[in-house]
């Protein structure tokens, strides 16, 4: 079964942020691949510096 990811917001630079069912977070950089977020990017999501769509 494929892993399910859910869009949860955007970083200030416009990159989409996703969370999977296990609570892992990733950002979308080219609309095709998900990559791991840096600690600073994850911190900005946790602190609410992203936009919910």
Image (cartoon, grey):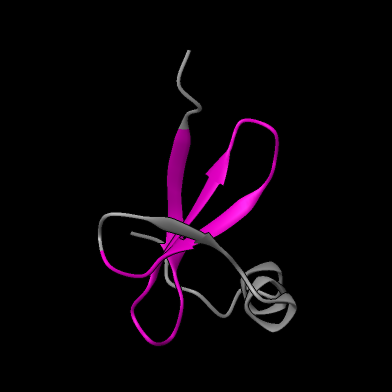
At which x and y percent is residue 34? Answer: 44, 55
Q: Which of 2 and 46 is in front in this view?
A: 2
Left or right of 39? Residue 31 is left
Residue at figure coordinates x 64%, y 79% from the top left = 44
Quarter-of-image position of residue 48? bottom right
| Residue 32 lies in the magenta-colored region | no
Identity of the residue drawn at 61% across and 69% down: 37
* Residue at 57% from the left image edge and 80% from the top image edge: 49
Q: In this view, does 49 lie above or below 9?
A: below
Q: In this view, does 17 lie to the left or right of 22?
A: left
**From what the image shows, is residue 25 above or below residue 41?**
above
Nearest the viewer among 50 and 36 is 36
Which region shows up in magenta?
A: 5-30
Observer-nearest residue: 38 or 48? 38
Q: Residue furthest top?
A: 1
- In the rendered structure, the answer to whether residue 29 lies left or right of residue 48 reads left
């Amino acid at each position: 079964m494929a892993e399910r990811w859910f869009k949860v917001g955007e970083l200030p630079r416009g990159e989409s942020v996703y969370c999977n069912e296990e609570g892992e977070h990733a950002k979308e950089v080219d609309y095709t691949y998900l990559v791991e977020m840096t600690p600073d990017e994850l911190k900005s999501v946790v602190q609410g510096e992203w936009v919910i769509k």
